[in-house]
Image: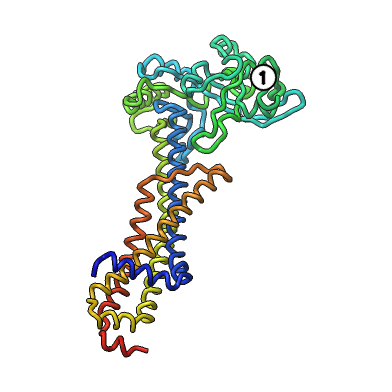
Amino acid sequence: MHLFIIVHVALKALARNKMRTSLTMLGMIIGVTAVIAMVALGTGAQLQIEEQVQSAGTNLISIRAGNFRRGGVSMGMGGAPTLKSEDVDAIRAQVPGAVYLAASVNTRDQVISAGQNWSAQIEGTDVEFPIIRFWEVELGTFFTQAHVRSAAKVAVLGTVVRDNLFGESADPVGQRIRIRNQSFQVIGVMESKGSGQFGQDQDDIILAPYTTVQKKLRGRDGTNISGISISAVSPDQMDEISAQITAVLREQHGLIPGDDDDFMLRTQEDIASMLTGMTETMTGLLAAIAGISLLVGGIGIMNIMLVSVTERTREIGLRMAVGAKGRDVLWQFLVEAVVLSISGGLIGVGLGFSLAASLTRFFQWPTAVPGEAVLLAVGFAAATGIFFGFYPARKAAQLDPIESLRFE
């Protein structure tokens, strides 16, 4: 029998009971919709991570104090003040590939201005910070080396802090803010940066000279710092430069072979790999859970096809009595199963795109549907139809025509 005729007969058989056909496809529709939506969420998260890495600079190296063991107890990152400003000078002098460096001293406090107050992250840093982070000043200027040397009480605001203290899109340059009873002059506002790699709001920040934060806010006259940000000369030399920095810091801190590092060094690639690995694992888990719906949909197709074979036993016997071969009957029922699964898959793809778009629109979750995910979902739906439709089709093809015509 010609394939066109087989397809035509299969479609007519499905159209005879539209409600049952629709309900049979429902499991496949739900499964494909869930798979597309989950993959879209995972892919969107990975793309957002890549954008954040690019915005921070692919050649960024971050060093944080701590990360050593004392008395069998791991102190962890920031567990002790093991970094000093002299370490910055040593790296600058001994590691040519470390082009830009900025010490950092962090704290968090309540900020007050003109009757408004806001709790913000306060980051003491150096003049090369905007270059390292590819971060432009929107209003005013960034502080200078003279401000750092004199521990001047000047501040550059992130847009979130600016909006909450002075009003949205206001120009606060020249105004004063108070932090721990210390009066700071606002000299600039940074451009909006958005969310960071771990979901924190990068614009909810106040930047000041690290010497000022050390002496005026943290009450330390020493040279201890929380971390160092470094911009390497090239992303291709990250491993080599990281190894050189590690060697310099170990020498600076008097560590001997066998001692644990008393600092933690991370590159943007390390952070991106860690975050991407987490999102890939979560995406795979969610897709696997959604894939169970596809399996349930396939079992539903198999169940309905078996019922259909039983109901249409006399029809099958009549067709075989007038010349249809077993393979024609097999192909007819197999085509019905594939049509059910592919139709459900295509509808599911459309609903998956709609659900992904809705998540982005109403919840601002980043989503992106890769083309291979669509092909995989439709292909898996077709394979499910063939797999679960073959047994009922084969059962129909093996019916005895005489016994089929006698079936009541």
Residue 214 at least partly seen: no
Residue under the image location 63 percent in, 15 percent down = 187
Circle 1 SS class: loop
The amino acid beneath tag 1 is Asp
Residue 183's spot in the image, x, y percent? 70, 18
Residue 316, above or below 207: below
Residue nearest the viewer, comparing 14 with 371: 14
Residue under the image location 46 percent in, 51 percent down = 38
Q: Quadrant of residue 370?
A: top left
How many numbered marks does the figure carry?
1
Residue 310's spot in the image, x, y percent? 36, 81
Residue 376's spot in the image, x, y percent? 35, 53
- Indicate left or right for 103 with 324 as reference: right
Residue nearest the viewer, comparing 222 with 302: 302
Residue 259's spot in the image, x, y percent? 38, 32
Q: Quadrant of residue 309?
A: bottom left
Residue 320, above or below 15: below
Q: Which residue is mark 1?
A: 171
